[in-house]
Image (cartoon, rainbow, N blue to C red):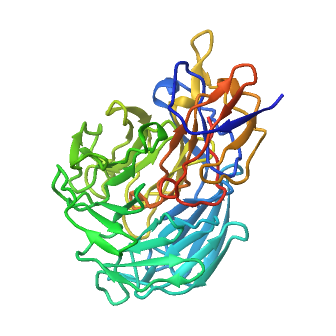
């Protein structure tokens, strides 16, 4: 018999070890447990190479509300290509649907709109030297159509998007259509289009790392050593907010907004790691709730990483994977993955891949709580078609005989199609008594070692009656904590 599980804010209590339930917005439960030898999968997780391969270079990818993955690759880092391509990958069936586009989306910025569509800014006008296009593209995941809307003021190649608290999208950086660095900010609204560009008082790196803060402002965490904050309300920048301990450019390293939780007032911490060539293994964290925010050194990763990926898991830990010690050099590939625990500030092993993941590699958290890993394009015209799945240790357990087996997972029979701010919502499950927590995960969009819409998880505990097996929870009350998002794929474990 299915029971109603409602969710509301509160402190997390893990007095036992039941499975956690992580929820996005469109609740679709999918199981994907590789049939390889488990080994110590319950300790470090398990890596598996998928039987199917990607038919296009997966340069920029985004998780769609239906659990599928958009690959917007354009001419795929190959100047001999005359056709700009994209694909939608279905992880459940292992199939791809391919299509061509009339403009080149290679090296764009991509993020999610509140209605579930994908906003794509910029792309490639010319190779070697590269120039950016002004195009703004919207992808509809229902019809799988690309639609060109109002152009930006200038071209952008290698820009970054950031979703704002009011549902608009900010775009920053990139190389323009004339070859200059575009250091303007533009903001897009689906009803009114683009605002006039506002020039920043500094020249940003390409693909800057941008994070929405609970106060509605945008934190620029790199890759340069000096951090800055942009206020969309005043359209102004505050520079020199903090300087990294590393003190050098962390290009093609990564940055994540660590999970926000109501139990600590949505304490805002940002973590950066890796980057540079020769690459560094160092990592740092800044607590923006501190009286005087400053970058603080963390223990290093197990290996230096440039062109890496970092993925926030439903447990609140951060998976660091891929990259190499020297840029685009597979002989120095960092095959071992690491798992960072923000609570203890420690790293632990997360298994080992057998495939070098370098430039243009990507990784996304999927609705079944596994991580999809693809791509590697160390030079023009050659790329890695093999795809992998990393199944974290939380998907495994041991049986009575001590053998490693897949862990029992919660079953969801129904759930709310939409969740409002500060409004209780229900999930029907026969496993309510065994659910320790719920996590909201924003679907990711990944390219060039950074996820422009990297999902910060919010964890709610079950408040429950043991007789009725009822737990209750509420999502955040403010869009600054969780930007408006359409129903999106749920991650559950």
Quadrant of the frame with the N terminus: top right
Closer to us: 237 or 307: 237
- Examine the rendering and report whether any part of residue 87 can be seen: yes
**Residue 35 drawn at (x, y percent):** 63, 33
x, y percent for residue 198: 34, 82
Q: Residue at x 69, y 70 (%)?
A: 144
The percent position of residue 215, horizontal first and vertical second, equals 40, 58
* 222 lies above or below 293: below
> Relative to 84, is 342 on the left or the right?
left
State which quadrant residue 378 falls in: bottom left
Give the image quarter of residue 493: top right
Farthest bottom residue?
178
Rendered position, 392 above or below 150: above
Q: Which x, y percent locates residue 11? A: 50, 32
User: Residue drawn 54% across and 69% down?
Assistant: 72
Please identify the residue farthest to the right as the structure is shown: 1
Q: Is residue 322 above or below residue 211?
A: above
Where is 13 relative to 71, above or below? above
Residue 107 seen in render = no
């Amino acid at each position: 018999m299915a029971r109603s599980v409602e969710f509301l804010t509160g402190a997390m209590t893990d007095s036992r070890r039941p499975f956690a339930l992580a929820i996005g917005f469109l609740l679709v439960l999918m199981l994907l447990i590789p049939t390889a030898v488990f080994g110590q999968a319950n300790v470090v997780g398990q890596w598996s190479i998928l039987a199917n391969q990607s038919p296009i270079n997966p340069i920029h990818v985004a998780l769609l509300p239906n659990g599928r993955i958009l690959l917007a690759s354009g001419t795929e880092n190959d100047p001999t290509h005359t056709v700009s391509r994209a694909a939608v990958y279905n992880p459940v069936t292992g199939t791809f649907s391919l299509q061509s586009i009339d403009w080149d989306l290679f090296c764009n910025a991509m993020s999610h709109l509140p209605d579930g569509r994908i906003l794509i800014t910029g792309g490639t006008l010319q190779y070697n030297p590269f120039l950016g296009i002004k195009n703004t593209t919207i992808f509809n995941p229902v019809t799988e159509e690309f639609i060109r809307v109002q152009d930006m003021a200038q071209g952008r190649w290698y820009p970054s998007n950031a979703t704002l608290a009011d549902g608009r999208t900010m775009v920053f950086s990139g190389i323009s259509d004339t070859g200059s660095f575009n250091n303007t900010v533009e903001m897009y609204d689906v009803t009114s289009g683009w605002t006039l560009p506002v020039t920043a008082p500094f020249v940003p790196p390409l693909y800057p790392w941008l994070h929405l803060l609970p106060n509605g402002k945008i934190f620029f965490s790199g890759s340069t050593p000096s951090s800055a904050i942009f206020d969309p309300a005043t359209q102004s920048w505050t520079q020199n907010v903090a300087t990294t301990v590393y003190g050098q450019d962390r290009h093609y390293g990564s940055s994540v907004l660590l999970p926000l939780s109501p139990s600590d007032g949505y304490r805002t911490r940002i973590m950066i790691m890796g980057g540079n060539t020769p690459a560094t293994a160092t990592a740092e964290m800044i607590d923006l709730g501190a009286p005087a925010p400053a970058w603080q050194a963390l223990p290093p990763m197990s290996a230096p990483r440039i062109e890496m990926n970092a993925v926030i898991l439903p447990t609140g830990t951060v998976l660091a994977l891929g990259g190499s010690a020297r840029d685009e050099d597979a002989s120095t590939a960092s095959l071992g993955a690491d798992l960072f625990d923000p609570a203890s500030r420690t790293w632990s092993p997360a298994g080992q891949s057998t495939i070098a993941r370098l430039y243009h590699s990507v990784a996304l958290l999927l609705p079944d709580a596994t991580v999809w890993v693809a791509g590697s394009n160390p030079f023009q015209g050659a790329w890695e078609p093999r795809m992998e799945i990393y199944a974290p240790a939380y998907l495994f357990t041991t049986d009575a005989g001590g053998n490693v087996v897949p862990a029992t997972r919660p079953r969801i029979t129904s759930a709310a199609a939409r969740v409002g701010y500060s409004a209780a919502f229900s999930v029907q499950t026969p496993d309510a008594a065994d659910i320790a927590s719920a996590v909201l995960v924003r679907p990711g969009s990944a390219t060039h070692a950074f996820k422009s819409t990297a999902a910060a998880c919010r964890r709610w505990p079950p408040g429950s009656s043991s007789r009725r097996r009822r737990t209750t929870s509420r999502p955040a009350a403010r869009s600054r904590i969780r930007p408006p998002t359409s129903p999106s794929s749920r991650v559950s474990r």
